[in-house]
Amino acid sequence: MPLSSPPARTPGTWDVIVVGAGPAGATAARIAAQQGCRTLLLERAAIPRYKTCGGGLIGASLAALPPGLPLKVYDTAQRFTFGFNGRKERTLASAAPTCAMVFRSELDAALTEAAERGGAVVRDSTALTALEQHGATVSVKTNRGESLHAGVVVGADGSASRVARYVGVQCAQVDLALEVETPVDQDTAERWRGRMLMEWGPLPGSFGWVFPKGDVCTAGVVAARGNPGALRAYKADFLRRHGLDGPRPHHDTGHLTRCRRPDSPLARGRVLVAGDAAALVDHWSREGISYALRSGDLAGHAAAGVVSAAGQAEAAAAVDHYARQVDEVLGAEMRASSALMQVFVHHPGAVHAALTRLPAAWRRLDAYIAGDTSVAGIMTTPLGRAAAAIGVRIPSARRPGSERRAWSGASDSRLDAP
């Protein structure tokens, strides 16, 4: 849809409307508001709300959080246990412990409050029901019977996004994740304290995880969708083997994770997508928080650029610039993770052996977790040679953006340790 000059402001019209108050949406709303845009953030659920998510913040996520964000960290992974379908477990120590364990409900609420402090208006329990564009105006209808208008809309409404369907987002990989948040006794909590588990599972491309959070463990399994019965069986066996099938869990849920095709659109006219709505998720680890925070930041700046554009060409250039930025940084990382995923699907035993027996491979993964390298950096180890052996092309290694800030666990002023 062609872009045109923004309309003069009228009562009830916003500069920017952001749909979805997860990490991508809350970040986009905060950035747009801080750039001087009259910004509305819509969230379909009541905040705070539960979100199925492991809740592990790697270095790239921590670097993308707003300074001073009040957020409780329940544990920090200092040791990583890797297993191969219940066998061959080995625990490795992190050189610089970075993976911070949080609850997504608290993370999203803190980011939404930061957006409010930045000047955005937040309306929760408000779902988008319709979306259309007319020239330089995007019109949004909600479940409250409202008809809202904006110069730009950013869709960050999750993997089942209405805005993504409007934009035409296409996926190369769709997976099903099943997860529990379960209370644990003191002995079990102590056994997991400071240690997280990644276990390569029996289904192609599958794995299970345990993330410790004090008296709660978040645990789950993920695999390609299409065989939910087998995945449920793996989940039951996984929880039983790791002693997490006892008390009734606080949450027992599932959701789909989607990874975009490299040529999938990121905008349609004045409507942009970010985070899960854009299907920006790591193919191998299915990590999405860092992608959401970074794409939300880019989308917020792009939205402000469209609003302030002098005419059609300048507005279109702001949208095009957003798409290029996402592709050059996040898209490059996803292409590397897709290559790693292909190696993992074909040779999970080799991946496990490389990570647990070859120090260079573990150092690369540890550096990625800390935010010191990208997924492509992991592939400059024997994993890269395994990829070449099956004909997988490995994109060039690339460090994360220069905006990375150092993080030192509980001493970091942005996060509150237990």
Image: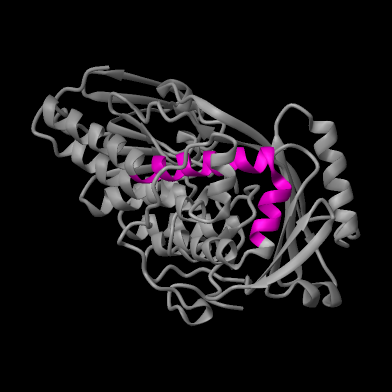
Pick the front one: 45 or 341: 341
- The residue sitting at the bottom extreme is 411
Residue 333: in magenta span: yes
Number of numbered callouts drawn: 0
Residue 224: in magenta span: no
The overriding secondary structure of the stretch rendered in magenta is helix
Pick the front one: 170 or 131: 170
In the figure, 10 relative to 52: above or below?
above
Q: Position of residue 306 (x, y in %)?
A: 20, 35
Q: Position of residue 222 (x, y in %)?
A: 71, 43
Magenta residues, start to end: 329-355
- The residue sitting at the left extreme is 310
User: Quadrant of residue 138 in the image?
Assistant: top left
User: Quadrant of residue 103 in the image?
Assistant: bottom right
**Image quarter in which the C terminus is found:** bottom right
Q: In the image, is 312 to the left or to the right of 75?
A: left
Q: In the image, is 67 to the left or to the right of 102?
A: left
Q: Position of residue 268 (x, y in %)?
A: 33, 24
The residue sitting at 47% across, 46% down in the picture is 21
Determine if residue 189 is in view.
Answer: yes
**Image quarter in which the N terminus is found:** top left
User: Quadrant of residue 198 in the image?
Assistant: bottom right
Q: In the image, is 178 to the left or to the right of 101?
A: right
Q: Position of residue 221 (x, y in %)?
A: 74, 46
The residue sitting at 36% across, 64% down in the picture is 404
Pick the front one: 257 or 103: 257
Pick the front one: 192 or 272: 192
Q: In the image, is 152 to the left or to the right of 218?
A: left
Determine if residue 20 is in view.
Answer: no
Query: Which of the colour schemes (rainbow, by chain, secondary structure, one colour) is used?
Result: one colour
The residue sitting at 82% across, 67% down in the picture is 184
